[in-house]
Image (spheres, rainbow, N blue to C red):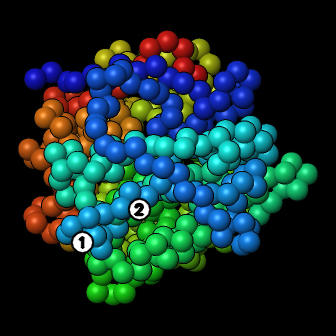
Amino acid sequence: MGSWVVLALVLGFLAGAARASEPWSNGTQVYYTNGNSGGGNGAFVGLTLIQSAAARGAVCLDGSLPGYHLHRGSGSGLNNWLVNLEGGGWCNDVKNCVYRKSSRRGSSNHMEKQLQFTGIMSNRPEENPDFYNWNRVKVRYCDGGSFTGDGTDAASGLYFRGQRIWQAAMDDLMAQGMRSARQALLSGCSAGGASTILHCDEFRGLFPSNARVKCLADAGMFLDAIDIAGRRGMRQFFNGIVRLQGSGRSLPRSCTSRMDKTSCFFPQNVLPNMQTPTFILNTAYDVWQLQESLAPKTADRQGLWERCKQNYASCSGNQLQFLNGFRDEMLDAVKGFSGSGQNGVFINSCFAHCQSERQDTWYSGNSPRLGNKRIAEAVGDWYFERGNAKYTDCAYPCDSTCHHIVFRGSHL
């Protein structure tokens, strides 16, 4: 079977002029796929605003209340909780954050009132065999700093309260019954995957020692990589977030005690000292990082990478060699982590981004596989300790089960 290709059209995080000022929009929002690709028949779940959040200053960028979508568990899953942290990029300066606060990524006033739960969030056993009947929660993302900020910019009317939103959401969910959880899983995709790593040990601390608590980070391994022009653009961007939003105080002390705060916004530097069992799900050729970190327009003034960024099949030999170097960095970043028996990895050689919340990549008849395991099966085996949980793909183009993303039109 040939590679299963998702045709995609890139959308900017905001339209028009806002787009030019926010190049680091999140991969889960960068594209949409055709009607037959994402799939899934999961329930539509309503938005709950956290009414108690305002009193503690736990508000979105614009000062509105944060929220989440909760679908209650049933049967054997009644006391099990899956908490998913939404992704959606970041804002690293006042201008970016001002644009962001007029969208669902910065204000609950613009959030969808209902979201469909698919992939790992689905309530259907044929779509999500291990977690379908758990209490499943999607915590909305409206702070622009991976739930880490704690500050304000009064002149611009901006509230950087990501850490307080995290705490308010967890407190509210505990009151909703999560304190009785026997099993819990914190997950997230893209910026939400990074958030999952940054908050994983905090999440573990909410529960008694006899509860099974683990974390799943999907497409959250944003690397401190050098781009095609020899620059570290991602480091500069993350440094802006940490400085603007006051994130340093909220980052894991296991990292900040030995490295600078910006370094500790990179998940690869947090992994070595994490105590909680964690599963890293990532593509070795992450298309978001290819477009926005490795070969952004600012580093590719002549547009030599445009065709490669739109369609992996158009990459030259030299470009693939560069991307294989990035793959090597990805594998090296998780090498020590994956050596621990409590952790799991699934790193496939696909040109994609986020695979746990899309039905076609999470659990369907033609989902990506490694070791003849679909992603849902590999994660389930790891969480319930049923078997091997270490899967690393060979280099592109050896994997014929990939759901590659191909972009159409101008996208940067």
Query: In this image, 324 relative to 306: left or right?
Result: left
Which image quarter: residue 103?
top right
* Residue 316 percent coordinates (x, y): 36, 17
Identify the secondary structure beneath mark 1.
loop
Above or below, comparing residue 21 to residue 265 in the picture: above
For the point 18% across and 37% down, the residue is 364
Most extreme residue toward the bottom is 209
Q: Mark 1 or mark 2: which comes first in sequence?
A: 2
The correct choice, above or below, for 225 with respect to 263 in the image is: above
Which circle marks residue 411 in the picture?
none
Asked whether 123 or 163 is in front, the reply is 123
Quadrant where the C terminus is found in the figure: top right
The three-letter code of the residue at mark 1 reads Gln
Residue drawn at (28%, 38%) of the image: 41
The crowd level at tag 1 (other Cα within 10 Å; few <14, some 14-19, many 20+) is some
Say which residue label 2 marks: 83
Which residue is depicted at the point 36% across and 62% down?
72
Where residue 353 sits, quadrant-wise, is top left
Marks 1 and 2: CB-CB under 8 Å? no
| Label total for image | 2
Q: Where residue 207 appears, x then y in whole percent?
A: 40, 82
Q: CA distance from mark 1 to mark 2?
A: 20 Å
Residue located 44% across and 26% down the image = 32
Q: Looking at the picture, how far across and down is residue 201, in whole percent?
A: 44, 74
- The residue nearer to you, when weighing 116 against 308, is 116
Q: Is residue 178 above or below residue 311?
A: below
Q: Amino acid at mark 2?
A: Val
The quadrant in which the N terminus is found is top left
Crowd class of label 2 (few under 14; some 14 to 19; many from 20; radius 10 Å): many
Label 2's element?
A: strand
Residue 342: mark: 1
Which one is closest to the eye, mark 1 or mark 2? 2
